[in-house]
Amino acid sequence: MESITRFDGFVGNAHPVSVLRRATAPGSRTLGHAYLLHGTAGTGKKTLAAVTAAALVCQGEDDRPCGECPACKKAFGAFGHPDILVFRTPEGKTQFPVELIREIRRQAYIRPNESEKKVILIQNAEMMNVASANALLKVLEEPPEHLVFILTCDNLSALPETIPSRCICLELHEVAPRRAEQWLLRHFPEESADRLEGALLCGGGNLGKCIRFLEDEATQKLFERAIELCRALSDGREYDLLVSLAPLEGNRDQFADFLSMVDRLVCETAKAGFVSSSREAVSLAARLSPGRAVRVHQLGNEMRRGLKANVSLSLLLAVYSSGLKTIMET
Ligand SMILES: [Zn+2]
């Protein structure tokens, strides 16, 4: 998929998109000094942050970002634009290091190289602990004239309160599945109807999840395993049920993804018959009773709590498979 380089490439989320578009237009009087984009993973926060950052450095006459000028080419290019700095929690760390905040503060007061504005993007701001958040407060509240902060965050409640109170907060949502379908057809014209149907079943109105299905083979395989589990469950095939769970050993993130995929499937299954659904959902719905679907969902919630509380993965998988067996037998 080609990357989105203009505000009109977005589907849904009309409010945040129009706020940012107006704020970054040439001669705008509504530009704030800090924005916080929040919402579920996969709703387009990072993409919208990147487009907004590009709009702030774009040299285009009116509709910014134009996607064409040298500044836009840099902003969307492999090496980035020198006045757009991106900060995120380093791989393998569970918290945003306070040293990175010091680097952000140092960079904040250095004037932009090429543009009038300099943009500091902070991804997954919920990874900041109280110490990091406190270290950022002063510059976030009163940044130098040339600077705009854009923060993104999946979970607003995990963020120290002092951060959102200093930002213009904009929430992003999933889009209606029908609109997601139209968007996918436009952006993935080469894909087969089967693959697009799979992507929609996997992600629904969450375009990030749909795209991951299409672009990441591991995600597609994991989703196929989730379908296999639901089929085995509804047909009473205990051995196949265990087989579908076996490869999840050893990877907590993968198990979390798997749980949300199973959840999505049972939820779609419950809706099948009421709204237009994929063939897979309809065929599962014919076999998996609504009562069982609800119990699978509840069991998934228990597992998510276990993951959060750091319960060992092997124990969780054992409880999950025996819970599913019980659901199967009743
Ligand atoms: Zn431009």
Image (cartoon, helix red, strand yellow):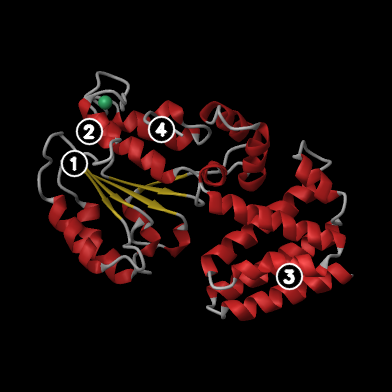
Question: Which quadrant of the view contains residue 308?
Answer: bottom right
Q: Which residue is mark 3?
A: 242
Residue at 26% x, 36% y: name it: 75
| Residue ID for mark 1 | 83
Q: Ligand 1 near label 4 (Cβ, under 8 Å)? A: no
Among numbered discs 2 and 1, the one appearing first in the sequence: 2
Q: Amino acid at mark 3?
A: Leu
* Of callouts 4 and 3, the N-terminal one: 4
Q: Nearer the viewer, mark 1 or mark 3?
A: 3
Q: Residues within 10 Å of mark 3 (few under 14, many from 20)?
A: some
Q: Is mark 2 within 8 Å of ligand 1?
A: yes
- At x 55%, y 29%, the residue is 190
Tag 1: amino acid:
Asp
The residue at 28%/34% (across/down) is: 54
Label 2 Cα crowd, 10 Å radius (few <14 / some 14-19 / many 20+): many
- In the rendered image, which residue does mark 2 sit on? 57
First in sequence, mark 4 or 1: give its number: 4
Q: Quadrant of residue 125?
A: bottom left
Residue that badge 4 annotates: 4
* Residue 259 as seen in the image, left or right of residue 58: right
Determine the residue positioned at 67% across, 44% down: 201
- Sequence-earlier tag: 2 or 3: 2
Q: Earlier in the sequence, mark 1 or mark 3?
A: 1
Task: Residue 78 in the image: state x and y as whole percent.
Answer: 28, 40
CB within 8 Å, label 2 to label 1: yes
Query: In terms of secondary structure, where does tag 1 sit?
Result: loop
**Separation (CA) of disc 4 from disc 1:** 19 Å
Q: Nearer the viewer, mark 2 or mark 3?
A: 3
Closer to the camera, 3 or 176?
3
**Outermost residue, top direction?**
61
Residue 136 lies, in percent from the top left, at: 24, 60
